[in-house]
Amino acid sequence: MKRILAMLLTFAMLLGATACGSSSAASGAAGAAGGPPGAPAASESSKGKTDLVIATAAEAVTLDPQDGWDGNSLYIMRQLYNGLVKLNDKMEIVGDLAESWEFTSDTSVTFKLKHGVKFHNGDEMKASDVVYSIERAQKSAKVKTFTANIASVTADDDYTVTIKTNIPYAPLMSNLCHTANSIVSQKAAEAAGDKFSASPVGTGPFKFVKWDSGDKIVLEKNADYFAGTVKPTSLTFKLMSEGSARTIALETGEVDLNLTVAASDAKRISEEDSVKLVTSMSPKIEYVSMNQKEKPFDNALVRQAINYAIDRKSLNTVATAGYGEVTDSVMNKQISGYTDDVAHYDYNPEKAKELLKQAGYENGFETTILVSGDTRNTEAQLIQANLAEVGINVTINTAESTAMLEQINNGGYKMFIMSYNNTTGDPDTSLYMLFNSKVPASSGNRSFTNIPEVDQKLEAARVETNADARMKIYAELQKTLTEQAVWVPLYCVPNLVGIRGDLSGYTPHPLGNDVFDQLSYE
């Protein structure tokens, strides 16, 4: 195992060194600017630049907020849309399209909308658009969990909306912060039908221009943005799947911001003068999922064995250069209600073998693990080596991210590696939609967890209005889910963002809900 880990660590360092070598050659030819010979320094050439380029590691799946909420899509959709409310950088729920709101009972809340808000097509946003958008989310299998227990949405007049719930529903306001409840133009959405993702119309700081699949998504400034001046003239989200390519592009000034710095490049970027590394802990958790509908993963002993068999600390070192935080909980520590008071699966191959024997798999078994991207392929190699030590032979299958997600949602997998991102800050978002048996895979329960006790507690937490009592339920849930080994939680995911040294206006949101309307070279 030590030999395999050493090889993987060497591989990770070589990736960084290769990238460094390429960059050094470029820098040597161009001076500190990192551009072509004779080019001005990046700081000089960037001054006054307003057409900004942002590097992304993977492509968006959809730009329709009621059609999905994968992390790659969210980056773009946050620029295009607004909701009734949002979470500010202090994790407080504040008005967005709503000027104010009032709970008239424990099952009814009335929102007063801001006047004069314009959609990107020039139409004024009205209460009817709010009603349409939330009802549209209710009809979507992919996002309807964010409208759970909403009984009705009504337009009292053009600028007043009342939402009523079936029960006293604690996560309501947090759920309304989610992109799934973004307000879209009813006129534009009805005209586009199922093609709305190709011509999205919201109220956000940027308007959609074009989507060149496999290459880039281009947005332009919304001059009529209700929330203030938008500084960039345009944003181009440029797809660059290779981490070294994103780093070099940042260093040369080809891109202004790299949303996903490869861990192998983090130290290098932090030590350069022309660029900056911005680090924070995201609300994401990296995990291995096991299909609990399929043998042998329907057996909790097998799932526990795999938890003991995987060396999380070594994997975190390889995958994040140590920037991540190893965890056993199924919930990220950034989220309210997180507890570390759960079962701990320290790396213990002998314990794993013992549990496999108890489960009837003394001689192990064969299985597959599905991944997308270089980093997760490296993670899968380490996991493959770990599991081989306890007799489990793993074949690594790779797929493009969209195809992988479709396969998972159809239940066509044994194991996969993915991260989960909580964008509301409420523990309900982490636990209910991930582990409630009633939630379809397309909305979150991709492990196909079906534990009656868990379902019962998840429902109880939703109606518990006492905050302390509610958090106690979530602590109990984390204990149960960890004991049942519904996942192999790996680590809390760090945000490693690279920006040009003279680019201002970027402050990471605690939940990653970044909006780029204030980026500027001043």
Image: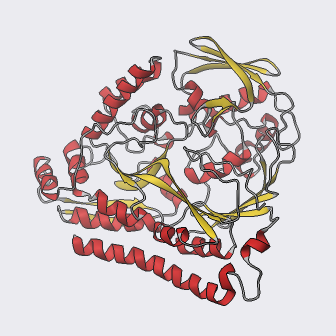
Q: Residue 5: image x %, image y %?
A: 28, 71
Front-most of residues 81 and 368: 81
Which residue is located at x 24 percent, y 53 percent?
A: 306
Which residue is located at x 11 percent, y 52 percent?
A: 354
Q: Quadrant of residue 450?
A: top left
Q: Quadrant of the C terminus?
A: bottom right
Residue 480 sits above or below residue 15 on the image: above
Q: Quadrant of residue 256?
A: bottom right
Front-most of residues 291 and 472: 472
Residue 133 sits above or below residue 149 on the image: below
Is 12 left or right of 146, judged from the image as shown?
left
Is residue 141 at all visible to an observer of this figure? yes
Front-most of residues 46 and 8: 46
Q: Residue 340: image x %, image y %?
A: 31, 39
Which residue is located at x 56 percent, y 25 percent?
A: 172
Is 226 left or right of 362, judged from the image as shown?
right
Which residue is located at x 52 percent, y 79 percent?
A: 19
Is residue 242 at all visible to an observer of this figure? no
Number of numbered discs visible in the structure rendering: 0
Q: Residue 239: image x %, image y %?
A: 63, 66
Q: Residue furthest right?
A: 122
Front-most of residues 146 and 177: 177
Residue 491 sits above or below residue 521 on the image: above
Is 39 left or right of 500, judged from the image as shown?
right
Q: Residue furthest top?
A: 105
Q: Quadrant of the N terminus?
A: bottom left
Q: Residue 121: image x %, image y %?
A: 86, 43
